[in-house]
Image: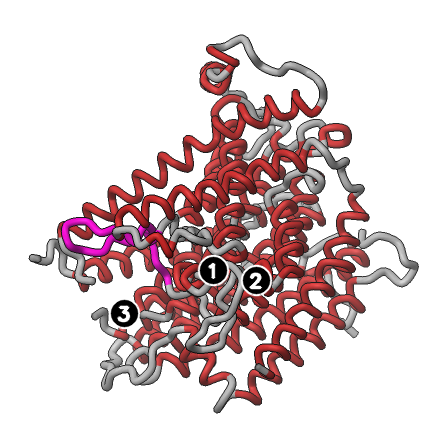
Amino acid sequence: MDALIDPTLLTRIAFYFFSALSIVAALFVVVHRNPIVSAVALVMTFLGVAGLYLTLGATFLTAVQILVYAGAIMVLFLFVIMLLNLEKDPFEEPHVPRLLGAGLAIALLFGLVAVLGGTVAVGTSIRSGSAEEIGKIFFGEYIFPFEMASLLLLVAMIGVIVVARRSDGKEAL
Amino acid sequence: MIPVADYYVVASVLFAIGAAGFLTRKNLLVMFMSVELMLNAANLVLLAASSTHDLGRGSAMALVSVAVAAAEVGVGLAIIIALFRLRASVDAEEMTNLHG
Amino acid sequence: MSPDIAYFAATLAKIVAIFLLSVHVVPIMVILERRISAWVQFRIGPNRVGPLGLFQPLADLVKFLGKEDFVPAQANKVLFWAAPALTCLPPFLVMTLIPFAPPFEVMGRELPAVIVDSSIGIILALALSSLTVYGIAIGGWSSNSKYSLLGGLRSSAQMISYELALGLSVLAVICVSGTLNLSDMITRQTAFFGFDDATGNWAGWNIFSQPVAFLVFLVASYAETNRLPFDLPEAESELVGGYHTEYSATKFSLFFMGEYIGMLGMACLIVILFLGGWHLPGVAALDLSPNVFALVGLLVFMAKVGFFLLLFIQVRWTLPRFRYDQLMQVGWKVLLPIALANILVTGFVVAWS
């Protein structure tokens, strides 16, 4: 049967949609004075980035991005913000260090775009980003980084409990 | 397919927004979120670059970076909670204990 | 498959069908829940509207839509509006991943009875269902009421705790079936009880090879959907109405719908992971034509899902509510170690055989 819509066009539309979503949401993260709104906007950014992964064909990373970043990390952020019961940040007049920081970031943007923007890709992918391929890589060639990552997570878990626990055995806050 | 350079531009914008947030905000939690934004931009570059060479290996590397980010968020939030307990604030400019 | 007109039309039809199915499960569940709860408590229950009170959900709907849509003065307006939609959306997305029946055959082409037949379906289902927590947490926070906030906090803590047990119990099932695709997972449970003659792998229902994982998943799914005995986020004796205290009218009904469709999704996942999906011993031997087989499969799947939905209701009206510290103890000190030990044993058995 005839193709109704060119598949590459669909990918292109998805790319622009998810790019716009992640960039606009990222701006909200940085600009909004209410930390909860920032956290929700960051979830949107992560979902947008997950969509970009999907347009690249990295299906497993898409699921991991949603599961770990959007599903676990941001819930933790939201939980901590709600636990600390933070108010809106006070409005501040722009001052020198702040303007300097913003200027540096803009300079960084131009530098990055100048360096990376002209890249022309060569070659084609020899392996897909499916769960099976990633599993083969992790349990073959990359077994050491894999084990190190698990060790790191264990150490981090113990560290978190030690740091966040109160020494007098009362509740967290 | 979409040119890899387009992905690089999106990632650059995300990274710059994250950097701007980290440099201009004073709320520790928002600064931390900005760091996550930069990490994501880096991951996006990694995957976009590997998509034309070896997406499987790029995904594996990105997966390790996601695991590291998860560990980092746990420890970072624990430190912020401990600081909040000490200071009742999450303003970076009030953390001046080591000012000498 | 290249995206041609027939493919788009079929996908659109499937989306409409599954959306309508999900939406219509809610009123059926509501009337069942009210009648069964009445029966458990020796009451009569709603029996005024229509024959046997069957039209009660319609009356409820009119009531919900007709009420004043109240927004507290101090609430964060945008988030207060967004929260019900955020709660309602992820369960619908999970439903798109569920294969309801064997592939149908329409005009000489195979038509799978699932909208997205993803190669990583089970991981996506877990990832999407974990997004439900945002709607609840944000709804609790944006109401600017202490009961709502406490309900939202409790719920987010509960959901991230029980997600671990849920995910780990699924890992053991993945070890046994060797696939992440939900349709493949079902086709690898063809036999009721027994091994595949050709490969020697387990080909029966996973409830027999993974009884521990089944129990852990069942308990954790009650906690994930905020149902009794784990409905601490909305414990009415302590928190008034929990995270949706300040909500009314359509927004409240959206929270309600999200909860029930979440239950439907969880029941579907239980059936797919542990009870062989659309398989029923004896049906395959009848040698039916593909379409009839698919139809029978659909009915079998629905019957199994219905059983678990009734179990959800039955448990709610039978068991008392846990205390909050008990809830955390069960999650972290009982379910999690059991699930981990189960993975370890499963891993050894799979590697050894």
Residue A10 horizontal side relative to residue C332, left or right: left
Could you tell which of marks 1 and 2 lies nearer the N-terminus? Answer: 1
Q: Is residue C117 inside the magenta stretch?
A: yes
Instruction: Residue at the far top: name it.
Output: C48
Name the residue tied to disc 1.
C122
Label 3 and label 2: CA atoms lie apart by 38 Å
- Are discs 3 and 2 less than 8 Å apart at CB? no
Where is residue C251? Give x, y as percent. Answer: 50, 28
Going 25% across and 53% down the picture, which residue do you hit?
C111
Q: Is residue C108 inside the magenta stretch?
A: yes
Q: Nearer the viewer, mark 3 or mark 2?
A: 2
Name the residue tied to disc 2.
C170
Most foreground residue, A43 or C127: C127
Residue C204 seen = yes
Question: Does mark 2 fall on the same chain as mark 3?
Answer: no
**Which of the chains bears the disc numbered 1?**
C
Label 1 and label 2: CA atoms lie apart by 8 Å
The part of the image, by quadrant, that contains residue A129 is bottom left
Q: Amino acid at mark 1?
A: Ile
